[in-house]
Image (spheres, rainbow, N blue to C red):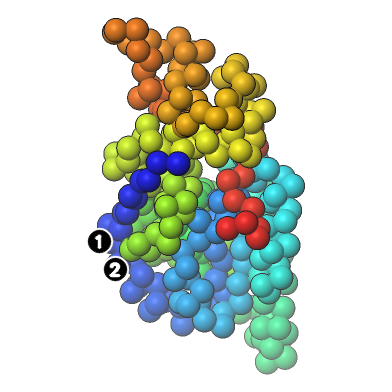
Amino acid sequence: MEELNIQWYPGHMTRARRKMEECLKMVDAVCEITDARIPLSSRNPDIDALAGDKPRMMILNRVDQADPAVTKRWAAYFRSRNMVVLETDCKSGKGIRGFSQAVRELLAEKLAGYAAKGQTGRKLRVMVVGIPNVGKSTFINQVAGRKIAAASDRPGVTRANQWVSVDASLDLLDTPGILWPKFDSQEVGENLACTGAVRDEILDRVTLAANLMLRLRAMYPERLTERYKFVPDPEADGFALLEAAAKKRGFLISGGEYDLDRMAAVLLDEFRGGKLGRVSLEEPGKN
């Protein structure tokens, strides 16, 4: 595995963190959205400290691209930490309908308190947080049933807090995606880079793709064979695996060499697009 140094912390994220701290006193609960393929890597560890004792909900998004057996274990993992868990695919809308009811279950005690005081019409307010490019804006648009939040495959699109009314009883506070200043490990940085949470422009994509090849060989070797029509050599390094795939795709350049840049771009695009099947890069208890 080749070493990659991946760091990215735009200045607007520091400001967003301060703004989030200010807004927390206005909400009843915190809903965190993560990428189901990398639930730990796609969490900002600052959120636990920021949220304090606020009731918590965990959205495992992009479940359509994640290994379903692994996702089931992640759901149990977060529930064991007193979080309400919802599994969603924001692009298709799967799991979205259960959100409002899940919020009411999460805040049942608060709703009972409102009812006891005769405040049955009082709105619940939930802050929605998540690192860039986990599908937060698409999630909010799906829950609201209309396009409100800017959605993009590019990380860092949402730049300011905004309130979104879901219905007469629920408001959401959309917040900019926040990454932390320094990733805890190379694996965290690579997971984020592989799923598109870090801009490709700052990366050595060939090394990233070579390392992804090694991980896929270890975890899902059959997917490499199905997609790229070669059996991964158990002794080969990541660059050799990338070259084997490039050879099968016919990605030749002058001098008879294979175009690893092109193959790296294809591998990352196809992984992100789900063309390698349902793949999870993290498992509970192994990270």
Question: Which residue is identified by label 1?
Answer: 11
The answer to whether any part of residue 112 appears in the image is yes
Q: Nearer the viewer, residue 236 or 133?
A: 236
On the image, numbered disc 2 is attached to which residue?
A: 15
Check disc 1 and give the amino acid type. Answer: Gly
Q: Label 2 is placed on what type of residue?
A: Arg
Compared with residue 111, is residue 179 higher up or lower down, i.e. above or below? above
Q: How many marks?
A: 2
Q: Is residue 170 left or right of residue 199?
A: right
Q: Position of residue 140 (x, y in %)?
A: 53, 55
Image disc number at residue 136: none
Q: Residue at x 46, y 25 (%)?
A: 240
Residues at marks 2 and 1, CA–CA distance in whole angstroms: 7 Å
Q: Is residue 48 above or below residue 272?
A: below
* Residue 167 visible here: no
**Which image quadrant for residue 119?**
bottom right
Location of residue 12 in the rendering, given as x and y in whole percent from the top left corner: 28, 61
